[in-house]
Every structure is written in structure tokens, then in C-alpha cells.
Image (cartoon, rainbow, N blue to C red):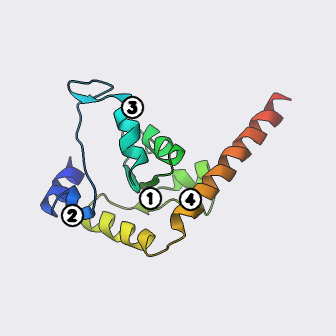
Amino acid sequence: MAMIDDVAAGGGAEALGGRMILTHSFDDPIHGLVVGRYRDLVASSKFTFCPEGVHVESYRLWEALEVSSIPITTCDSYFEGLLGHGHPLPCVHDWTWSALQATMELVENDSDYACKVVSWYQEYRLSLVHKLRRALM
């Protein structure tokens, strides 16, 4: 909840040029977002915040990558092991307003950044296919 409070104190998601939707559950049209609406929101977002939950990695990371939204993760060595050394995904050491804003500004200052992430992810997925094929042979 600290991230939400900090973003609100900093002017809200609108001040970041985006939106923040808080939900109580997944795929619940009364208390949350239905799957299609959630996917549309992520797909239309330049950035998707992917903070840790029970584990440092979350489904949101993969959901963002699949629709070419740039995921912002927690800076953790776990991602180097999972995604490879030198992956292009931006990260924050803490989920404060200033850390998020600084990270997004760095990414936005590189006009090719989004293309780099999409290209990297396509190669990453292909490498997983090759690894799976080798493992099954």
C-alpha cells in the first residue's frame, strides 16, 4: 500500500501521465476488472508496474511483455538469472513516486527503448522454444 499512498501524495497516476486502477479481485465484474478490460488496459499502457507480491516475479511482467507494454520491475538479481544478464527491463529499488518517475523519464528519453524491449522479448521467447525442444529430444 505504500506505493499507492506515495503515488497519491505525488499527484496521483494522472501526474505520471497514466492511470491507476485498484481492484479487489481478478476477473470479477463487480469488484475488479474482467480479463478483456484488464488486457486492453495493459496493452494501451506504455508502462506496467510489476511490483513483487508473494514472489519477486509476477504474472504482470509476462502480461505486459506479451502486449508490448514496458514492465517496470523491482531491482533484484533474480531477474538476471531468469531473463539473462543485460536484459533491457527497467527496474526500481523502491516503489516511491520519485523512483517511478525517474525510471520512466530515463526510458522516455531513449526513443528506441520500447523497440529494444520488444525485440529482446521476441528473441527471449525464441530461445525458450529452442531450450524446450532440446530438453524434449
Task: Tell me which corner region of the image, top left, top right, bottom left or bottom right, holds residue 21.
Answer: top left
Q: In this view, does 81 lie to the left or right of 60?
A: right
Q: In this view, does 122 lie above or below 88?
A: above
- Label 4: few (<14), some (14–19) or many (≥20) C-alpha neighbours in 10 Å: many
Q: Which of marks 1 and 2 is in front?
A: 2
- Point out the tag, 1 or 4, that comes first from the N-terminus: 1
Q: Which amino acid does label 3 sit on?
A: Gly
Q: Can you identify the residue that label 1 sits on?
A: 75
Asked if 43 appears above or below 37 in the picture, the reply is below
Q: Position of residue 110 (x, y in %)?
A: 49, 74
**Element type at marker 2?**
helix
Bin the neighbour count of mark 1 within 10 Å (Cα to Cα): few under 14, some 14-19, many 20 and up.
some
Residue at the bottom extreme, as displayed:
109
Where is residue 123? Give x, y as percent.
Answer: 69, 52
**Earlier sequence position, callout 2 versus callout 3:** 2
Q: Which quarter of the rendered picture does the C terminus lie within?
A: top right
Q: Which residue lies furthest to the left in this view?
A: 9
Question: Which three-letter amino acid code belongs to the residue tagged 2?
Answer: Ala
Residue extending farthest to the right is: 137
> Which mark is drawn over residue 15?
2
**Nearer mark to the viewer, of 1 and 4:** 4
User: Which of disc 2 and disc 1 is earlier in sequence?
Assistant: 2
Give the alpha-carbon distance from disc 3 to disc 4, as whole Å. 24 Å
The residue tagged 4 is 117
In the drawing, does residue 134 fall left or right of residue 112?
Answer: right
Of labels 1 and 3, earlier in sequence is: 3
Mark yes or no: residue 54 visible: no
What's the amino acid at mark 1?
Answer: Cys
Counting residues from the start of the chain, the first of labels 3 and 4 encountered is 3
